[in-house]
Amino acid sequence: SLAKDYDVYYRVHASNIGWMAWAKDGEEAGTTGMSCSLEAVQIKLIKKGASHPDTSGYSHLEIPSVTYSSQVKGAWQNSVSAGEVSGTTGQGIPITGFSAKTTSSVAGGINYQLHLSNVGWTSGKSNGVQLSSTAESNSVEAIKISLSGDLATYFDVWYRVHVDNVGWLGWTKNGSVAGSTGYGAHVQAIQVRLTRKGANAPGSTVSPCLLGQPTAFANPMQKKIVDLARQVPSPGPGLCSEWIADIYERAGFRNVHTDACDYYWDYCKYTDYSHLKVGMVIAVPSHTHTRMGSIYGHVCLYIGNNQVMDNVGRIRTLDMAYWLDYYSTSYKPKWGWYDNVPLA
């Protein structure tokens, strides 16, 4: 019979992957659960013992399983699987440890690193090893998760965290920071998912990491500035600095009557996010998007939770990362206190 004298070798071309490794005699070829359609197939009938195609590599791929667990109040919770919530929400209880592991025929592992309050970034752990604080007071503020080996070649690891007084942040992936550092905003829960390399995020990717002071941690005067920013109308186009001066004047500060270029040179001293506080101004002395902007620059107000407000003839609330990227055509944006008067 054919089966006695021959082996059948075959391989498939999968969308988003390309040609996969050769399989033979009933082995699986293609993908499972990865939304990769088969675009082409090659088949070879080879006499047993004869030279045959190289079968090294992966003829079949499927999304690996991932399980993870959090330490809460000194005790480890039961592990949950892809996309499920580990930790708690709405109870004000921070997590103090984390572990994760994957199960897959693909070589590699999962790595994780924690930023702990009063400690900073820990050394990393991987593949189910529990990583936690020795003191319950040192809670998790941020986390980085990544894949290694062939897992990192074929898959992305997505994750997001639920932060004290803020809620769920956006999804991020592959070793980027989720959470915050240095503001005492504790992580209370986490979700993790593995997807095909390059696949869409499981949800919104807006603000996975709080780069500046969260709104909830602002003092009464800082919150007053934010409240006024939501009330004070636009004084007109080209008057971005006058709008901010009007806000501060209504809060009891002097009106400096100067332009965004002067804000940048006189008040904005920082580029480190650890110095970014609610109520600070963020400015550039020049940008290329408008003629007036090239002369006088532009300025916005940081209102917390990675958001800014500015005046362009109307009042806008924008994602800070977008603002920083858009207006950095000539100068790197800097931030500082209006009129050099600290609110916090």
Image (cartoon, rainbow, N blue to C red):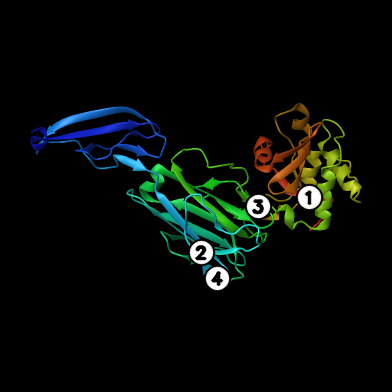
How far apart, in angstroms, are the residues tagged by discs 3 and 1?
A: 21 Å
| Disc 3: CA contacts within 10 A as few (<14), some (14-19) or many (>=20) | some
Q: Amino acid at mark 1?
A: Gly
Is label 4 in contact with label 1 (beta carbons under 8 Å)?
no
User: Which quarter of the figure is the C terminus placed in?
Assistant: bottom right
Q: Counting residues from the N terminus, which is met first, the one under dot 2 or under dot 3?
A: 2
How far apart, in angstroms, are the residues tagged by discs 4 and 1?
A: 37 Å
How many marks on residues?
Answer: 4
The residue to which callout 1 is attached is 279
Q: Amino acid at mark 4?
A: Gly
| Disc 2: CA contacts within 10 A as few (<14), some (14-19) or many (>=20) | some
How far apart, in angstroms, are the residues tagged by discs 2 and 1?
A: 39 Å
- The residue positioned 58% from the left and 57% from the top of the image is 189
The residue to which callout 4 is attached is 74
The residue to which callout 2 is attached is 77
**Residue 129 percent location from the top left of the image:** 43, 64
Q: In front of the other: label 3 or label 1?
A: 3
Of residue 218 and residue 160, the one placed in the foreground of this image is: 160
Secondary structure found at label 3? strand
289 left or right of 187 in image: right
Q: Quadrant of residue 90?
A: bottom right
Q: In front of the other: label 4 or label 2?
A: 2
Q: Counting residues from the N terminus, which is met first, the one under dot 2 or under dot 1?
A: 2
